[in-house]
Image (cartoon, helix red, strand yellow):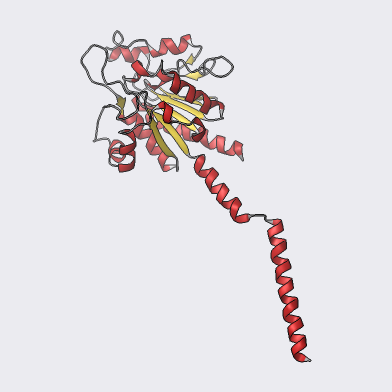
Amino acid sequence: MSNTIKTKTLLFLSLFMVLLIGCNNKNNPDKTSVIVEEKTETKALKKILFVVTSHSEKGNTGEKTGYYLGEVSHPWDVLHAAGYEIDFISPKGGKAPVDAFDMNDSINKKFWDNDTYRNKIENTKKPSDVNPEDYVAIHYAGGHGAMWDFADNKEIAEIAAKIYENNGVVSAVCHGPAGLVNIKLSNGKYLVDGKKVNAFTNEEEIKVKLQEVVPFLLEDQLTERGAIFEKSAPFTTHVVSDQRLVTGQNPQSAQSVGKATLKELQKRTKNLK
């Protein structure tokens, strides 16, 4: 008789455990799957695209140029430390020419000594390699080379417009805003129209004696596109954020552009929750 009671008790406990597990699964359907999906989504939302120039000469001066290293490394340092993965694109793809190669700048050295990112910037993506849906932001690094191959690159402008209209952030520093002058949104308006913007100023271009060499003056071109142009004294830090558009005036503003971009991305993340 006691064996029968034991058997019935064991059967009852087994049935109870089955029912309990079933209820938990009902209340938390495919819990493992949800966790995996959340991790995948988080990873997909953590990529930023940096744009660098493919142009290596300052007009007919015989002087070399390229992307300004500090305008890549300083924003990279801020955003990479915050957990974002950075990819690089240039108008032509492949190895991008570098300017202001200063290894006394500890952030420049940190970037250059990072094997992963050194390989990325020496093997930049072509516009045709990029899916805008993969990125939450796009950053245009400066360097005088940008004045020759950013403004008229329709493919990169379209990538930037798609990222922006997908609630992404667009940032640029120094001569990087050359990439902003012809970005048009789906409503037909220029991205900079009606927004506060800054960039390398006319006064700064005159001070470096390249006002007659560059194909256009950034301050004038952005103003013509409807931008509300702000500026500070030459070669002092000035950064402005307006409606997910972040711009910095000069190399001195590069780190602050990275911080302002991060702030905009943090706002975006809160809005998505």
Please tell me whether residue 39 is drawn above or below residue 125 in the rendered image.
Answer: below
Could you say where residue 6 lies in the image, as x and y percent from the top left? 74, 86
Which residue is farthest bottom? 1
- Report if residue 174 is visible in the image: yes
Q: Nearer the viewer, residue 247 or 32?
A: 32
**Location of residue 77 with respect to 71 vertically, above or below:** below
The answer to whether 218 appears left or right of 212 in the picture is right
Between 52 and 29, the one nearer to me in the picture: 29
The image position of residue 127, as x and y in percent, is 42, 26
Q: Which x, y percent locates residue 147?
A: 35, 16
At a point 51% along the width and 23% down the height, the residue shown is 161
Closer to us: 42 or 267: 42
Place residue 73 in its image quadrant: top left
Count of all numbered marks drawn on residues in the image: 0
Q: Is residue 14 left or right of residue 107?
A: right
Q: Can residue 79 be seen?
A: no
As drawn, the residue found furthest toward the left would be 62
Q: Quadrant of the C terminus?
A: top right
Q: Residue at x 27, y 35 (%)?
A: 105
In the image: residue 149, left or right of residue 228: left
Q: Which quadrant would the N terminus be assigned to in this image? A: bottom right
Image location of residue 7, percent across then percent down: 74, 84
The residue under the point 23% across, 20% down is: 64
Q: Residue at x 57, y 48 (%)?
A: 37
